[in-house]
Image: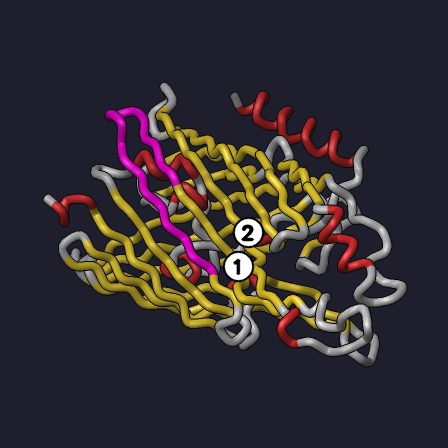
């Protein structure tokens, strides 16, 4: 299986390299979910073991003992943009589990002023209309235990829907593959996102596009490409749990997040780049949790021409009581917010609450 996995990843990257591909595509699917994971700088590929594993590593949902659901909402750009996430996962039997999740990142009530000036050159505010731009991701997850004790795998099938008012819309499809291995208190994980590449096929309304062509002279004169390719990404994670005197616990984890393009990440070549991340989760009587993490190491070019290394610290807290988990993180989610840091809350509910 390992040989097939590596071959499939290598084949996907090779095929994409022969085509036109964007360095950043469908980035809303890389923002992250769950305040607990965000507080640990997203370093959870190897240790994720709840309903949110449908996002971080689908193999992790095999650790569920009962059905579980999760919700998260966050706002960005002074509440102009909203980011919403919902997930549900359940075990099928003692060797397999399934899950489903949905993500929406959108900006609503955008002013369309392309028709503000009529044919006589008069400004008519009644000609202003509203539209929304939104990205949707629907993920269907399946996980199963392998014959080797402690080794699990999971697969995500993704449907991407992107809408820009009446101007354009697209459908995209792709797959993720994840594995986890558990040995004692150690957990290892690998997550290959968009392993077959994810293709978005755009449909552009020519009539609506014509209104944009005439809005600003010399701009938007040609229609953009209708095929968008998301290249694979690889995440490798490891973590270990430590217990102290029965009441206290510490989970330490790390991630190596790899893209097959050159970026400003800490380690970067013409073929790939790697961004490391570290996370810690300190628990008391399995009820109260303090979290911290550091990641997003970037080589930033300064005004004087020298480079400096920037990184992003994250902190968070959590509380669990009778199957209800409430988590908070202070973080900058994927540099998507207008402010330096964002306040993120998420809720996770065990199904036994409803019984």
Check residue 77 for magenta coloring.
Answer: no
**Residue 311 drawn above or below residue 148:** below
Residue 68: x percent and y percent? 26, 44
Q: Magenta stretch mostly in which secondary structure?
A: strand
Residue extending farthest to the bottom is 304
Residue 79: x percent and y percent? 48, 72
Q: Which residues are magenta?
A: 83-100
Residue 21: x percent and y percent? 75, 42
Residue 229: x percent and y percent? 69, 40
Residue 92 falls left or right of residue 300: left
What is the C-alpha distance between the residues marked 1 and 2? 6 Å
Check residue 94 for magenta coloring.
Answer: yes
Q: Which residue is mark 1?
A: 106
**Residue 169 drawn above or below residue 308:** above
Question: Looking at the rendering, which quadrant does residue 247 occupy?
Answer: bottom left
| For the residues bearing labels 1 and 2, Cβ distance under 8 angstroms | yes
Label placed on residue 180: none
């Amino acid at each position: 299986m390992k040989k097939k996995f590596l071959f499939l990843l290598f084949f996907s990257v090779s095929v994409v390299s022969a085509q036109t591909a964007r360095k950043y595509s469908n980035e809303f699917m890389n923002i992250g979910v769950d305040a607990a994971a965000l507080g640990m700088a997203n370093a959870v590929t190897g240790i994720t073991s709840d309903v949110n594993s449908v996002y971080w590593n689908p193999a992790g949902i095999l650790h569920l003992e009962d059905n579980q659901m999760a919700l998260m909402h966050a706002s960005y750009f002074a509440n102009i943009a909203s980011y919403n996430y919902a997930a549900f996962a359940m075990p099928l039997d003692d060797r397999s589990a399934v899950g489903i999740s949905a993500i929406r990142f959108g900006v609503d009530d955008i002013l369309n002023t392309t028709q503000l000036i009529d044919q006589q050159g008069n400004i008519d505010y009644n000609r202003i209309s509203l539209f929304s731009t939104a990205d949707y991701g629907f993920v269907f997850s399946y996980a199963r235990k392998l014959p080797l004790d402690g080794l699990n795998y999971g697969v995500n099938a993704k449907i991407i829907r992107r809408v820009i008012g009446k101007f354009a819309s697209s459908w995209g499809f792709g797959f993720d593959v994840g594995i986890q291995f558990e040995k004692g208190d150690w957990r290892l994980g690998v997550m290959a996102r968009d392993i077959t590449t994810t293709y978005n096929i755009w449909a552009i309304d020519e009539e609506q596009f014509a209104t944009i062509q005439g809005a600003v002279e010399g701009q938007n004169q040609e229609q953009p490409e209708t095929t968008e390719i998301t290249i694979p990404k690889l995440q490798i994670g490891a973590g270990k749990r430590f217990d102290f005197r029965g009441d206290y616990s510490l989970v330490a984890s790390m991630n190596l997040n790899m893209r097959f393009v050159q970026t400003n990440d800490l380690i970067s070549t013409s073929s790939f780049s790697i961004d490391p991340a570290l996370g810690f989760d300190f628990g008391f009587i399995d009820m109260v949790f303090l979290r911290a993490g550091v990641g997003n190491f970037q080589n930033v070019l300064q005004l004087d021409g020298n480079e400096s290394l920037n990184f992003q610290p994250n902190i968070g807290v959590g509380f669990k009581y009778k199957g209800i988990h409430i988590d908070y993180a202070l973080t900058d989610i994927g540099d998507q917010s207008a402010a330096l840091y964002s306040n993120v809350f998420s809720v996770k509910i065990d199904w036994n609450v409803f019984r």
